[in-house]
């Protein structure tokens, strides 16, 4: 650490002098640091724009697909029947009758104090006749229930209190339920190993006195075109009939005494909303670029014009032009304005929902073709600029980051240089103070000697 000799001999504020000199020396570094900060701000805005472009690319890819404007709505005359259509399915209006809903097989055992055996062996038999042996650690109902559930044979079990026997001992029942609904989930639980089941000597828990099958596993069943010569019965292991009609799932929750009418039709409102959301996202990107590229002029004397973060950036300017062209150029000779998509003289992208809805009602295929063409071009532009490997905007960001890295290295060298310069100045001024102090000491000594000679001469 340098030794401070402020004004020791000269009475000067050498620290202030050194700091003032260092402020002058640091001017290039300060300018360089400000340049680095500016570049970091630009990088942050470019990265945000790039993220928006990547989101727009994903949306455009979807919008360019065949089902982008294929939204449909579904209704049911009974709340217990739910219709879930896929996008683009054909319109449908028909009736179904729900004869049965899917149930899970459930069995309750007789009331017992424990399962016989030390320890017992049980066998689960599924609907296909496959056998799974279960070996509980003891005959207590709780241990047996845990073992049956852990066997992975599609059965869950629990021990339920059932009072006491004549001697006051607690009684329990085993509640056994299939993990899935449908006839295929039916099962039987036997007291005995697999060999005993095969020999017919094992005891079925549900067949014991006091035991019961609470619910028999059954498939859900509906009838199409009930009461006609074309009547058709459909079953499902669950209460959802997947693709009951092409692209249409139907879920049921209760049996219906009369036919339920289900309807699937095109949804113009949803289609208009989907198109509007896509155009709005494009407009947001264009607005971001426009704001970042505008300059704020000085309003009073002495102020400077403030430039936008994207002002003068040729890559961003080219991106804005490419996006605008993708939206406003005709598609197969048809202007996007015919479906309500247009850019006004100020460069603002707008969407007219009424124009779009009218065009959709008159010629859905033509509207879909124009919209898909716009989406395809937007997809190409956003990919060209935002691709994470060779996108033009990605390259611009990388270039700015490389420049910040170079500036950071220069700043590090400047810090070392300035530290050395301060040390040199401190040594110089310290040496000056020391030398001046010596000269003052010598002057004082000589003065005292001369004064002594003068006094002797007078005597």
Image (cartoon, rainbow, N blue to C red):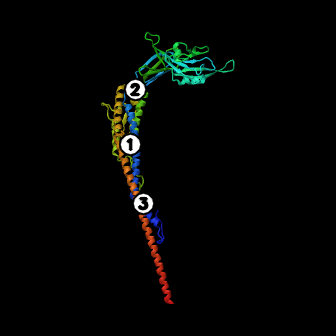
Left or right of 451 in this view: 118: right
Residue depth check, mark 2 versus mark 3: number of the one nearer the observer: 3
Residue occupied by mark 3: 419
Residue at x-position 34% and y-position 27%: 366
Q: Are marks 2 and 3 in contact (CB under 8 Å)?
A: no
Nearer-the-camera pick, 421 or 281: 421
Within-10-Å neighbours for mark 3: few <14, some 14–19, many 20+: few
Residue occupied by mark 1: 289
Query: Where residue 313 appears, x then y in whole percent?
Result: 35, 46
Left or right of 448 in this view: 62: left
Q: Quadrant of residue 91?
A: top left
Mark toward the start of the polypeptide (1 vs 3): 1
Within-10-Å neighbours for mark 1: few <14, some 14–19, many 20+: many
Residue occupied by mark 2: 70
Residue depth check, mark 1 versus mark 3: number of the one nearer the observer: 3
Mark toward the start of the polypeptide (1 vs 2): 2
Q: Are marks 1 and 3 in contact (CB under 8 Å)?
A: no
Give the secondary structure at mark 3.
helix
Nearer-the-camera pick, 360 or 274: 274
Within-10-Å neighbours for mark 2: few <14, some 14–19, many 20+: many
Cα–Cα gap, marks 1 and 3: 43 Å
């Amino acid at each position: 650490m340098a030794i401070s000799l402020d004004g020791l001999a000269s009475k000067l504020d050498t620290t202030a002098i050194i700091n003032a000199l260092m402020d002058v020396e640091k001017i290039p570094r300060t300018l360089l640091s400000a340049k680095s900060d500016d570049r970091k701000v630009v990088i942050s805005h470019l990265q945000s724009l790039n993220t928006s472009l990547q989101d727009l690319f994903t949306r455009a890819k979807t919008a360019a697909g065949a089902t982008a404007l294929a939204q449909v709505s579904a209704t049911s005359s009974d709340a217990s029947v739910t219709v879930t259509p896929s996008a683009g399915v054909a319109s449908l209006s028909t009736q179904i009758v729900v004869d049965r809903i899917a149930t899970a097989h459930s069995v309750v055992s007789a009331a017992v104090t424990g399962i016989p055996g030390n320890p017992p062996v049980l066998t689960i038999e599924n609907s296909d006749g496959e056998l799974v042996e279960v070996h509980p650690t003891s005959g207590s109902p709780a241990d047996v229930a845990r073992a049956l559930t852990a066997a992975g044979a599609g059965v869950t079990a629990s021990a339920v209190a059932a009072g006491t026997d004549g001697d006051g001992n607690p009684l329990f029942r085993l509640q056994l339920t299939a993990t899935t609904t449908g006839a295929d989930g039916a099962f039987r639980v036997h007291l005995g190993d697999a060999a005993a089941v095969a020999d017919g000597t094992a005891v079925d828990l549900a067949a014991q006195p006091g035991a019961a099958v609470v619910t028999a596993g059954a498939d859900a069943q509906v009838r199409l075109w009930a009461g006609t010569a074309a009547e058709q019965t459909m079953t499902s292991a669950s209460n959802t009939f997947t693709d009951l009609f092409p692209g249409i799932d139907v879920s049921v929750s209760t049996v219906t005494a009369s036919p339920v009418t289900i309807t699937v039709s095109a949804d113009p409102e949803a289609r208009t909303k989907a198109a509007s959301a896509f155009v709005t996202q494009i407009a947001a990107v264009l607005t971001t670029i426009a704001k970042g590229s505008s300059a704020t002029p000085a309003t009073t004397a002495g102020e400077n014009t403030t430039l936008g973060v994207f002002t003068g950036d040729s890559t961003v300017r080219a991106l804005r032009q490419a996006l605008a062209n993708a939206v406003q150029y005709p598609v197969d000779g048809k202007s996007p304005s015919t479906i309500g998509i247009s850019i006004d003289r100020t460069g603002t992208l707008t969407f007219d929902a009424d124009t779009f809805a009218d065009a959709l009602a008159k010629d859905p295929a033509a509207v879909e073709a124009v919209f898909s063409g716009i989406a395809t071009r937007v997809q190409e532009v956003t990919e060209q600029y935002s691709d994470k490997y060779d996108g033009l905007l990605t390259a611009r960001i990388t270039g700015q980051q490389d420049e910040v890295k170079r500036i950071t290295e220069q700043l590090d060298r400047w810090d070392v240089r300035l530290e050395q310069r301060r040390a040199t100045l401190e040594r110089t001024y310290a040496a000056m103070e020391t030398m001046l102090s010596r000269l003052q000491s010598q002057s004082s000594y000589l003065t005292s000697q001369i004064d002594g000679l003068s006094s002797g001469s007078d005597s």
